[in-house]
């Protein structure tokens, strides 16, 4: 089956057809360009959520994270909203927002050592992969 997804309703229809089963994207075409890429692409995390959970996440973002507003929109209690948020959050992998800085290059370490910014012991530890 070849399908071109052009709108949210197309995505909803695809979600209905797959009934929550895992899927792999094998062809990506850049809109407005004559470029297509074929391969095996995993869906982004948010696209792997059920349609209902995707709607819930969008509503949460539109309410600027207001659980009170979410209670009104969905007509459920605070604990119900929190439980659903926790369930959805538990299904997502979080991206590290403070990754460790890259290891300094050998020339950077030597320059810092020659300027007296670090000791020889610190330079050796850094070269061995430890943080100075």
Image (tube, rainbow, N blue to C red):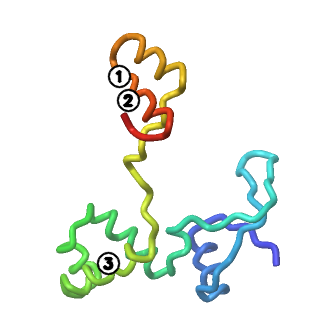
Pointer 1 local density, CA inside 10 Å: few below 14, some 14–19, many at least 20: some
The location of residue 40, given as percent across then percent down, is: 75, 65
Q: CA distance from mark 3 to mark 2?
A: 43 Å
Question: In this picture, is 50 found above or below 66?
Answer: below
Nearer the camera: disc 1 or disc 3:
1
User: The residue tagged with tag 3: helix, strand or loop?
Assistant: helix
What residue lies at 61% left-to-right and 89% top-to-bottom?
A: 19
Mark with earlier residue (3, 2): 3
Q: CA distance from mark 2 to mark 1?
A: 5 Å
What residue lies at 18% left-to-right and 82% top-to-bottom?
A: 78
User: The residue tagged with tag 1: helix, strand or loop?
Assistant: loop
Q: Is 58 in front, or is 39? A: 39
The location of residue 131, given as percent across then percent down, is: 39, 38
Left or right: residue 109 versus residue 9 is: left
Pointer 2 local density, CA inside 10 Å: few below 14, some 14–19, many at least 20: some
Left or right: residue 47 versus residue 26 is: left
The location of residue 94, given as percent across then percent down, is: 42, 62
The furthest residue to the front:
121
Quadrant assignment for the N terminus: bottom right
The location of residue 81, given as percent across then percent down, is: 26, 81
Left or right: residue 118 versus residue 33 is: left
Identify residue for label 2: 122
Identify residue for label 3: 86
């Amino acid at each position: 089956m070849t399908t071109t997804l052009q709108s949210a309703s197309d995505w909803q229809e695809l979600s209905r057809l797959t009934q929550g089963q895992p899927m792999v994207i094998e062809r990506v075409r850049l809109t407005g360009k004559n470029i297509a890429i074929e391969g095996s692409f995993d869906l982004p995390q948010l696209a792997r959520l059920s349609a209902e959970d995707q709607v819930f996440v969008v509503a949460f973002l539109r309410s600027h994270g207001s659980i009170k507003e979410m209670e009104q929109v969905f007509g459920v209690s605070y604990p119900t909203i929190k439980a659903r948020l926790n369930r959805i959050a538990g299904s997502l992998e979080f991206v590290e927002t403070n990754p460790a800085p890259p290891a300094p290059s050998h020339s950077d370490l030597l320059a810092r050592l020659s300027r007296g910014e670090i000791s020889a012991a610190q330079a050796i530890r850094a070269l061995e992969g430890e943080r100075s």
